[in-house]
Amino acid sequence: MDVLTLLWQRVGKIRVLATLALVAALAAGVVIANWDSGKKAEPVSTAADATLPRASSSEGGSPSSSPASQEAQSKAQDAASAAAAQAKAAEDAARKKKEEEASRSVTRTLGPPSYPIPAVCDVYKGKSDNKWRGCGLVFQAGFGFDQMSPCLEKLWDKESHWTTKAENKSSGAYGIAQALPPSKMSSVGSDWSWNPETQIKWGLGYIKGRYKTPCAAWSHSQSSGWY
């Protein structure tokens, strides 16, 4: 065998080996390419990305669960509760007023006084039953006739003419003592809208607490126009 033939055979073997190596490399490249294509693409971070604001969210969260939304919802609930309470208060006040008006319209007759009335009070007997009863309650409150005739009688003549259902249309004051609001008299009895004794007891208590005596209350009324 000559040198050229031997060289060709060797070169041929090298070519075959090179071809096989090339085919193996191409096959490996296809496998790698297929594997890479199955991977999830990762975002590329840049310097510009670092300057962009990122929205913060918790897992499973929603826009309605943000602090601002919760605060707005809380305010709305508070406003609704306040409106409901105001409506109920107005309804209760209207019902109470209706009940009071119905109570005032009923005519009732009192029985004999349950307390002693001094003979000195008989000057009112047959003239004004309310004054007669009131005179006895003045003594019950610890005062004497000197606080009744010259002072309390005149004070409540001016305020209501000793009329149980007397009402001041402008202020809403009511009763013999002109209580304002009238419901104050319920501290003495639930029958305050029609019972003169309940009204007088309340009025004497008011005078005691504010002026000490009916004459002091009358003096104040003369100087200021009210008591």
Image (cartoon, grey):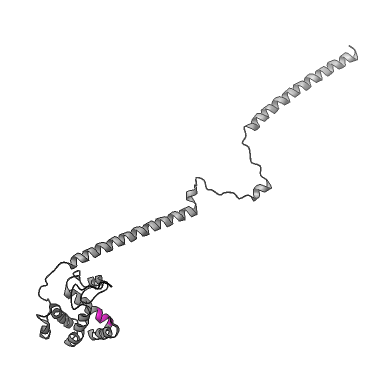
Magenta segment: does it hold 222? no
Q: Is residue 28 left or right of residue 136?
A: right
Q: What stretch is highlighted in magenta?
A: 206-210
| Corner quadrant of residue 187 | bottom left
* Image spot of residue 168 (x, y percent): 24, 73
Residue at the image position 11 percent from the left and 84 percent from the top: 123
* Image spot of residue 199 (x, y percent): 20, 75
Residue 40 vertical placement versus 104 (above, below): above
Question: How many numbered markers are drawn?
Answer: 0
* Image spot of residue 222 (x, y percent): 26, 85
Viewer-proximal residue among 34 and 216: 216
Magenta residues: mostly which secondary structure? Answer: helix
Residue at the image position 46 percent from the left and 53 percent from the top: 70
Q: In this view, does 94 lie to the left or right of 54?
A: left
Q: Which residue lies furthest to the front in this view?
A: 170
Residue at the image position 65 percent from the left and 49 percent from the top: 50
Residue 150 vertical placement versus 49 (above, below): below
Viewer-proximal residue among 29 and 159: 159
Q: Which residue lies furthest to the top in this view?
A: 1
Q: Which residue lies furthest to the right in this view?
A: 2
Q: In this view, does 20 lie to the left or right of 49?
A: right
| Corner quadrant of residue 34 | top right
| Corner quadrant of residue 203 | bottom left
